[in-house]
Amino acid sequence: MRINFNSYCLSIGGGNRTILELADGLVDHGHEVTITHMGHPSYYSWYGKPKAKISSLSLDIPSRFFQKYWLKKKGITYELDQKMSEMIPECDVNVATACETVYPTLFSGKGKPYHLVQHDETIFYSDTYQKNLVNFSYDFKIKKLCVSQWITDKYGGSYIGNGVNFNKFANFGLTRDIDILMVYHDENSWKGDTTELAHRFKQLGFKVALIKDISDINLVQLYNRSKYFVYPGKDREGFGLPQLEAMRCGCIVLTTACTEYCIKDYNCLEFEWRKDTTQLTRILYGLIYEVHKDKEKRETFIQNAEETTRLYNFNKVVSRFLEATK
């Protein structure tokens, strides 16, 4: 079967990891897989060497945003959707992976169209025009493939889920010389600011690492070197890969209730997001102190988390994708 994925870009992010992992898994199943995206060819270097054939429009982020949104808001037509649709190869299954790629997927007239829904994308935007574009993309009568149960419940379609590649993410028994690991999010991010929080923990004497623009090889190593993974997300994640990746690599996870697989006091320590970083640091310090002084509790969290990850082997996602698109 010929399967094509259409992406806004392939820069670092959980949504793009899902696309690349799906493509790899489908190639391993003997399918001919292509990925068409608007970004630069170098954008996926963080992932390694994908097995699918990849083609792109070679546009950087400012160019894509300017042409896709600003020009249209000013009433100026720029056929970015048409340019992308013309690049899409002949295929049997043609998958849009975000609202920006639903239109070119349909315009191409190639293959049977699907929409891989990875989030409630209205959360990303404050601009009414952009929110409307997202809502229009959800309204099309195109079968949806959803990465989580809550997305499936909200938008309908088939649940294919999400997960981690067990061949890549694992606990390698490295020395855990980093106290706290966090993903960099800036102060305007809907995910929650982490820079100030990391600074406050450093002031308390913790060794802190903040992940930003990192390759998979280094990412897995940092997970394996870290004792605690802290994720202060403000809003619900479409699925949320970092916490699951951290669990798979043996970290104790502290997170807000932003994923459907994190279970409070079973596989993670849970806290409420707060804008006041002083108060948030105090809360997190208390949670870390309680589990740090209790070896049995630490080991139980790690064991329960590892058991949770077994339910999210990415091979299952590939199988459900094939079942939903056959």
Image (tube, rainbow, N blue to C red):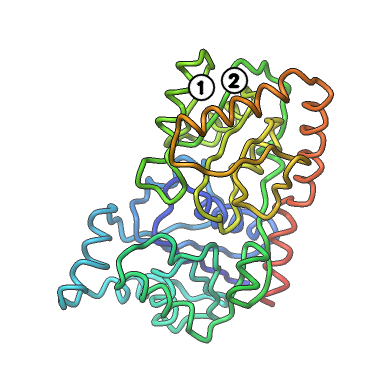
Residue at (73, 51) in percent of width and height: 312
Q: Marks 2/1: CA distance? A: 6 Å
Around disc 2, counting alpha carbons within 10 Å, would you say few (fewer than 14), some (14 to 19), or many (20 or more)? Answer: some
Determine the residue located farthest toward the bottom in the rendered image: 141
Residue at (67, 74) in percent of width and height: 158
| Residue 264 location (% of width, % of height) | 72, 44
Residue under label 1: 208
Secondary structure of the residue carrying tag 2 is: strand
| Residue 96 location (% of width, % of height) | 49, 70
Q: Along the polypeptide, which appears first: circle 2 or circle 1?
A: 2
**Is 293 drawn above or below residue 103 in the view shown?**
above
Residue at (41, 80) in percent of width and height: 136
Relative to the observer, which residue lies in front, 100 or 56? 100
Q: Which image quadrant for residue 169?
A: top right
**Is 55 drawn above or below residue 277 in the view shown?**
below
Does residue 92 appear left or right of residue 134 in this picture? right
Does residue 7 appear left or right of residue 167 in this picture? left
Relative to the observer, which residue lies in front, 92 or 251? 251
Residue under label 2: 179
Screen quadrant of the C terminus: bottom right
| Residue 67 location (% of width, % of height) | 22, 66
Q: Amino acid at mark 1?
A: Val
Question: CB of mark 2 within 8 Å of CB of mark 1?
Answer: yes
Around disc 1, counting alpha carbons within 10 Å, would you say few (fewer than 14), some (14 to 19), or many (20 or more)? Answer: many
Q: Amino acid at mark 2?
A: Asp
Screen quadrant of the N terminus: bottom right
